[in-house]
Structures are given as C-alpha cells and as structure tokens.
Image (cartoon, rainbow, N blue to C red):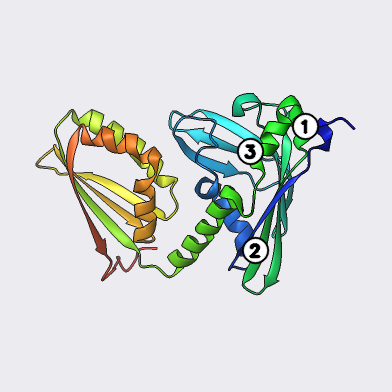
C-alpha cells in the first residue's frame, strides 16, 4: 500500500429532529440549499440536482446555462444511504473521470420516530492521487463540519416552513429603460426564483393603458424563504439588472380570502 492509499476517511455526523425518510428526502431533494457556496464549478450557480437512481448524476447549472457534474450516484437506498462520487481535481477544479474521484457516503440512522443521525463520510481519498493529502487536510476537522451544519439548518428551516403562513409579494415596476430589456432581465430573474426553496409561482403583468408600468405577483410558502432567496449572493446580479431598468415598489401581503370559479378544476 502506497502512502497515498493510507489516507484515512473523513467522517462527520449531525443529529436532526425529523424522521429518517424526511432527513433523506431533504438531503436528496434540496442540495442547492445545503451544498457549500464556495464549492462551485460554474459561475452564478442557480441549480444543483441529485438524480434519484444509481447511475444518475449530481450536477450544477450556472446562470449562463453551463452544466458541470460533481459526480455519479453509486448507491441509492432510501431512506438509509446515498453514495456519490466526488470529482475534484488539482486546484479544486472538476475532473470528468470517476476513476479519479473519491466517494461521499451519507448514512441515515433512525434514533426514534422523529430523530435521525446523519453521517457523511469522504472515503477513497487516495484516488485523488498526489493532491489527496491536501484534500484530506482541507476536509478534516470536528463534526458537524460546514456541509452538515448547513444541512441541519435546512432541516430546521423546512420544519419551520411547514407551519409558516404563505405570503404574496406584489412588486410594482416603473420601467425607465427599454421595455424589452426589462422583460428579458425579469425572465432571467424568474429563472433564478423558480429554483429557490419556498417559491410557488409568480406572474408579471403590464398595464394596458401604461406600457411602462408592470406588476409582479409572486406566491411563496413563507416569508423566511423569500428573504433567504433575495439574500443569496446569486440574486444580486439580477437585482442590479432590474434596478438599472426600472424603479420598484415591493410590498408583502398574506392571504385572507381565496375563491375560484365553481367549474374550475
């Protein structure tokens, strides 16, 4: 066994107050929320997806449409275990060969009806070759570590959102630049919001008698999710683009009455 192959695994744990199946689902379905922001291969990441089957990918997409895979789903065993390859090369740049990737093993152990221990293990680090010692040093440290700490925050937030009050954002825009450019900028902003947790839907309207006046009506599961979305660094370029083309007046509302046509589905 070479010195590189002697590099030990790095294992960290965290306990979350949800059942194992819920803990698994939040990890698998919401990676954009818990994945460390500094661990990114694309510019202005807008989505991060784990395909839910063995042989699937987990990959991120940038605002410009660039798509890069972080690895492959090696094991998919809900609600107990997920194993992914981790394609990190020199200078923390992507590699495109699973033979040069280590593994991320995530195990979910039920501690009771509403409590789960989650263990994340980086294994096979020797597969990174000569940079393996540096990668081990960067990953090593006490539990829970950045990734699991962020994951636990997401679990807590999702639990709080389950009992939160839905909100409606009504944002009026007075366009000061070309209307076509504003609508293009808004479409890019829309793509960002649709990928955010807690977003339900929105519609952009333009006044019939005043073509420079718009209003966006957006529905969110809760105010905290909306605030978290606009606080993300990735939102700032969208915000700046809209501010350069329009003056906005956002206001928040809560639903007090909802009705629909009797024959509506």
From the viewer's perspective, is 217 left or right of 69?
left
Which quadrant of the structure image shows residue 139?
Answer: top right
Q: Is residue 167 visible?
A: yes
CA neighbours of label 1 inside 10 A, class few (<14), some (14 to 19), many (20+): some
Looking at the image, is mark 3 or mark 2 nearer the viewer? 3
Q: What percent of the width, then of the height, locates residue 88?
A: 65, 31
From the viewer's perspective, is 79 left or right of 190?
right
- For the point 60% across and 25% down, the residue is 91
Disc 2 designates what residue?
21
Cα distance between the residues tagged 2 and 1: 31 Å
Q: Which type of secondary structure does the marked residue at label 1 adopt?
A: helix
For the view shown, which residue lies furthest in the left direction? 209
- For the point 22% across and 36% down, the residue is 243
In the image, is residue 57 above or below residue 224? above
Q: What percent of the width, then of the height, locates residue 70?
A: 63, 35
CA neighbours of label 3 inside 10 A, class few (<14), some (14 to 19), many (20+): few
- For the point 50% across and 28% down, the residue is 66
For the view shown, which residue lies furthest in the right direction? 1
Disc 1 designates what residue?
127
Which quadrant of the structure image shows residue 164?
Answer: bottom left
From the viewer's perspective, is 101 left or right of 180?
right
Marker disc for residue 138: 3
């Amino acid at each position: 066994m070479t010195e590189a192959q002697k590099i030990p695994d790095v294992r960290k744990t965290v306990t979350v107050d949800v059942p194992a199946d819920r803990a698994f689902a939040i990890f698998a379905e919401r990676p954009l929320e818990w994945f460390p922001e500094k661990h990114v291969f694309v510019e202005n990441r807008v989505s991060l997806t784990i395909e839910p089957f063995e042989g699937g990918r987990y990959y991120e997409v940038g605002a410009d449409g660039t798509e890069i895979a972080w690895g492959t789903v090696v094991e998919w065993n809900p609600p107990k275990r997920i194993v992914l390859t981790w394609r990190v090369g020199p200078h923390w740049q992507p590699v495109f060969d699973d033979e040069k990737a280590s593994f991320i093993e995530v195990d979910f152990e039920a501690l009771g009806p509403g409590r789960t221990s989650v263990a994340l293990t980086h294994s096979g680090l020797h597969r990174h070759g000569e940079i393996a010692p540096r990668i081990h040093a960067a990953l090593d440290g006490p539990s829970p570590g950045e990734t699991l700490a962020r994951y636990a925050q997401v679990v807590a937030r999702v639990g709080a959102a389950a009992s939160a009050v839905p909100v409606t954002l009504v944002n009026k825009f007075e366009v000061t630049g070309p209307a076509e450019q504003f609508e293009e900028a808004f479409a890019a902003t829309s793509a960002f919001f649709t990928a955010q947790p807690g977003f339900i839907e929105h519609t952009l309207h333009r006044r019939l008698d005043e073509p420079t006046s718009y209003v966006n009506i957006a529905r969110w599961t809760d105010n905290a999710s909306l605030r978290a979305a606009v606080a993300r660094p990735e939102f700032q370029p969208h915000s700046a683009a809209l501010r350069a083309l329009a003056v906005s007046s956002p206001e928040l509302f809560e639903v007090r009455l909802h009705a629909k046509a009797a024959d509506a589905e």
